[in-house]
Image (cartoon, rainbow, N blue to C red):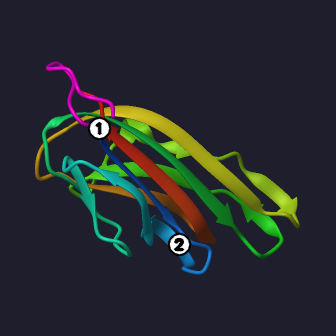
Amino acid sequence: MHKLSKCQKPAQYISSNSKATEIIHGIGTTTIRFSQNNIVEGTAISHTEGSDEIQINETGIYQVSYQLFGVQNVVGTFNFNAILSVNNEPLQDTFNQSPVIRNSTDNRMTLTSTVILRLQAGDVFRLNGVSIEDIVYDNARIDIEKIA
């Protein structure tokens, strides 16, 4: 059994995903609901399955990584973006823009990003899809770790 030294703290980590069976779609800003918690370790972060809210329970520095898969089932212009928000305020430096695809029959894209953020106890954190088109977000994953 691995023992922690006096300087080490248990990992504070959560990994959640949304399943393809719970399709989320929308025009404008769409918050992504995570239907399943794969790993929850510690108490710094909490999430209720099926919710779009991730609660920050301890002030600190967090590493956030996500994947957001979007698809549009019509031929035409295809573009969507992702942005993280805290307490319903978009974090503009986390804006992640996909390229614009025109006249394609295979309109699908995965956006990924990793950021490091200083978050406060009581913050409510969300991943959002943003588009002027009706995009289906049928798969997403988020991993959040308190690193300091």
Q: Residue at x 24, y 58 (%)?
A: 46
Mark 2: amino acid: Ile
Name the kind of residue labelled 1 in the image.
Ala
Residue corresponding to mark 2: 27
- Circles 1, 2 touching at the beta carbon (< 8 Å): no
Q: Is residue 147 shown to the viewer in this render?
A: yes
Foreground residue among 86 and 12: 12
Magenta range? 1-11
Please tell me whether residue 129 is drawn above or below residue 14 in the rendered image.
below
Q: Give the percent coordinates (x, y) of residue 15.
A: 42, 53
- Residue 28, position as x, y percentages in the image: 48, 67
At mark 1, the secondary structure is loop
Q: In the structure shown, which secondary structural element does the residue marked by tag 2 occupy?
A: strand
At x 61%, y 71%, the residue is 138
Location of residue 49 by image quarter? bottom left
Q: Residue 132's x, y, as percent? A: 57, 65
Q: Is residue 74 above or below residue 39?
A: below
